[in-house]
């Protein structure tokens, strides 16, 4: 593994790899009504940002808009100050990676093969597979502890393993920004924590800017450096978890009366819901 | 590499120093298997291609077939039998099989469903409707029928695409609408046939079953040229296709221009199946079965495009051999491919349902 000990001469200064993603007066929608209305957001560079909100508040839509899966109806998403529409799609793909909510894999595909497909934006019409691609796949597998699974087919894996493999694919894409749409949805609690630890590591150790949509407020508070709370297509509050997650905001965003106490383990806010009967 | 630049720390040199070589070896193994299998399939197709030209009321040895085919001087008798009598049929079978196999796997991969072959999603029945209409109503013949078939295939494909479009294309929607469109054209074909006089109806029926013997020179030439153009294009696009298989969202996130690539690939698939159908009629099931056979032989994950083309060619050549020589009466090729394909379809439906997968 000589690659790992002697990094190749860097391509550009490290600062130039710190990319800024911004939404400006962004309006998004599907066939019918607008879902996100004139929203402004600057993704903090090098931090973990978590978007929270009730079902249908537009958080996944916003993420899809940020990842150019959805064209803005008005406003724009800018990467390094330039609207995404002015970028070549492959250039964006080398800077910004996305794990969609329901990724699909062809039947019988092996883990190594799937992760290798993350290398697409680094290849060209005639420049096919290279040693660099092999190295990237290997690093991605190692970072997600899926090296042992490399030869297995995706269908054989458990839900938790499968999600790690998808993260590995996004890692192989080798982007500075990583966007994830509800990556923990189909996982049990231990695999949720497992995956979030992995993403935290990617941020802390590998310096990636992570933006994700999460449902679990308490896990969001624990892993996010920046929280964006959304309600009906608008940002209600954003900032550090302690600033944002207050009983007032939780009531406003989720319509849920609650008490917020410090998490006994991390000290981050812990939302304790007050039910109707048991409060 | 960004990971490396920022992160010399987490590398753990002590763990599995040979991971790298293991991964590389697995990839090379996968690739060499794909290449080996594809070459074998090409060889099978070639042997069958030569084989069909050897057999008949006048037997020719393989060497004579090869020399005569590639234009080296042979005795005039053999030249005549091989080049004038047997080569047109054999090359039609080869070209039609290649085109149908390739078209089938493009559709199946693109729509992520083994049922999504062009025979099922209306393309072939569109071609049939227009071809039969041109024979019965307009009294056309030869390459004009082929042209009508081409128009029909394109019309059907366009219709399905437009009807299935809703912020993108999903496999299921495309297939269901394709089946509907297919039924529409089949009903149309039946209606036209029921109003035809006996002579025209017979000619139309022959066309509908599909036979490599019916091809005219013009259609064959057009098909061969299109194959020569389309094959390299499809090979260049196999990387995009592999990415599109991961779903629109992932493909877009990886920088694929999804709509453009999908339309281009679908269009190549439609043109291929349309020209093949125009040349030899809607040869039942070839496009459906070639792809899955090739995928299984090549191994999952590898691009089985070329392999599927050769499987298609082998099926049609074999079916032609059987249809022409192995049975007491000479049959149209389409009858034989249908007889092979129908049990496969039933098996596919049964096994897909048992596994609870989409299909």
Image: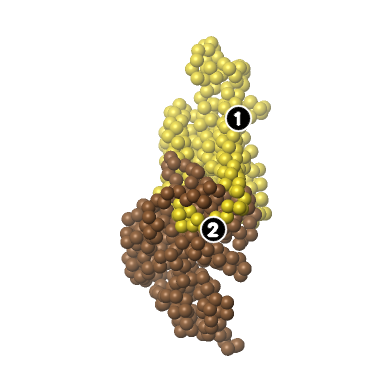
Q: Position of residue B100 (x, y in %)?
A: 52, 38
Is residue A2 positioned above or below A221 on the image?
A: above
Residue occupying the point 50% across, 44% down: A131
Is B243 in front, or is A118? A118
Q: Position of residue B159 (x, y in %)?
A: 44, 50
Q: Answer with the quarter of the image where residue B151 lies.
A: top left
Is residue A105 positioned above or below B59 on the image?
A: below
Is A40 in front, or is B87? A40
Q: Colour of chain A?
A: brown
> CA–CA distance between discs 2 and 1?
51 Å
- Mark positioned earlier in the residue sequence (2 or 1): 2
Residue B116 appears left or right of A88? right
Chain in yellow, by letter, is: B
Residue B273 appears left or right of B59? left
Write down the residue under mark 2. B10
Residue occupying the point 41% across, 70% down: A35
Residue occupying the point 44% across, 67% down: A47
Q: Position of residue A241 (x, y in %)?
A: 47, 76
- Pointer 2: residues within 10 angstroms few (<14), some, or many (20+)? few
Write down the residue under mark 1. B44
Residue occupying the point 60% across, 26% down: B47
Is residue B224 positioned above or below A112 on the image?
A: above
Whether residue A272 is visible here, answered yes or no, is: yes
């Amino acid at each position: 593994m000589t690659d790992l000990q002697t990094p190749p001469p860097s391509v550009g200064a490290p600062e130039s790899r710190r990319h800024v993603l911004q939404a400006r007066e962004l309006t998004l929608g599907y066939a019918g009504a607008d879902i996100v209305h004139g929203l402004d957001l600057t993704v903090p560079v090098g931090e973990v940002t978590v978007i929270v909100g009730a079902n249908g508040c537009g958080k996944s839509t916003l993420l899809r808009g940020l990842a150019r899966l959805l064209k803005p109806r008005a406003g724009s998403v800018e990467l390094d100050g330039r609207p995404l529409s002015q970028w070549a799609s492959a250039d964006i793909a080398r800077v910004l990676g996305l794990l969609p909510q329901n990724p699909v894999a062809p039947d019988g595909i092996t883990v190594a093969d799937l992760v290798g497909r993350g290398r697409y934006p680094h290849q060209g019409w005639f420049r096919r597979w290279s040693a660099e691609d092999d190295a990237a796949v290997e690093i991605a597998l190692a970072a997600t502890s899926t090296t042992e699974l490399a030869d297995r087919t995706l269908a054989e894996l458990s839900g938790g393993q499968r999600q790690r493999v998808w993260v590995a694919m996004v890692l192989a894409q080798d982007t500075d920004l990583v966007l994830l749409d509800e990556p923990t949805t189909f996982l049990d609690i231990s695999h949720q924590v497992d995956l979030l630890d992995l993403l935290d590591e990617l941020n802390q150790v590998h310096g990636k800017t992570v933006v994700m949509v999460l449902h679990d407020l308490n896990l969001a508070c624990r892993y996010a450096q920046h929280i964006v709370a959304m309600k009906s297509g608008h940002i209600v509050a954003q900032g550090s978890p302690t600033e944002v997650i207050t009983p007032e905001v939780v009531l406003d965003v989720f319509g849920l009366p609650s008490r917020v106490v410090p998490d006994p383990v991390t000290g981050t806010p812990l939302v304790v819901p007050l039910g109707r009967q048991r409060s | 590499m960004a990971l490396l630049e920022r992160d010399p720390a987490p590398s753990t040199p002590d763990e599995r120093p040979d991971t790298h070589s293991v991964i590389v070896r697995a990839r090379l193994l996968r690739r060499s298997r794909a290449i080996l299998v594809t070459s074998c399939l090409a060889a099978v197709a070639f042997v069958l291609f030569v084989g069909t030209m050897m057999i008949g009321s006048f037997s020719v040895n393989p060497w004579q077939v090869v020399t005569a085919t590639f234009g080296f001087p042979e005795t005039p008798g053999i030249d005549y039998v091989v080049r004038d009598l047997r080569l047109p049929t054999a090359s039609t079978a080869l070209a039609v099989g290649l085109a149908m196999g390739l078209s089938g796997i493009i559709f199946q991969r693109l729509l992520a469903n083994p049922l999504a072959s062009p025979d099922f999603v209306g393309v072939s029945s569109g071609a049939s409707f227009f071809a039969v209409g041109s024979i019965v109503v307009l009294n056309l013949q030869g390459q004009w029928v082929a042209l009508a078939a081409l128009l029909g295939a394109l019309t059907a494909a366009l219709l399905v695409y437009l009807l299935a479009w809703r912020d993108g294309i999903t496999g299921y929607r495309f297939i269901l609408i394709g089946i509907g469109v297919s039924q529409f054209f089949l009903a149309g074909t039946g209606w036209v046939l029921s109003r035809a006089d006996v002579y025209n109806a017979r000619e139309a029926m022959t066309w509908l079953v599909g036979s490599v013997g019916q091809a005219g020179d013009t259609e064959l030439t057009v098909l061969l040229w299109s194959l020569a153009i389309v094959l390299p294009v499809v090979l260049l696009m196999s990387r995009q296709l592999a990415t599109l298989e991961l779903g629109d969202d992932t493909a877009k996130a990886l920088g694929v221009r999804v709509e453009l690539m999908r339309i281009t690939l679908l269009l190549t698939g439609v043109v291929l199946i349309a020209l093949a159908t125009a040349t030899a009629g809607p040869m039942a099931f070839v496009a459906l079965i070639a792809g899955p056979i090739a995928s299984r032989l090549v191994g999952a994950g590898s691009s089985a495009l070329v392999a599927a083309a050769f499987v298609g060619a082998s099926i049609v050549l074999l079916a032609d051999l059987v249809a022409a020589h192995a049975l007491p009466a000479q049959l149209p090729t389409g009858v034989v491919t249908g007889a092979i394909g129908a049990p496969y379809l039933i098996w596919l439906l049964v096994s897909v349902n048992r596994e609870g997968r989409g299909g």
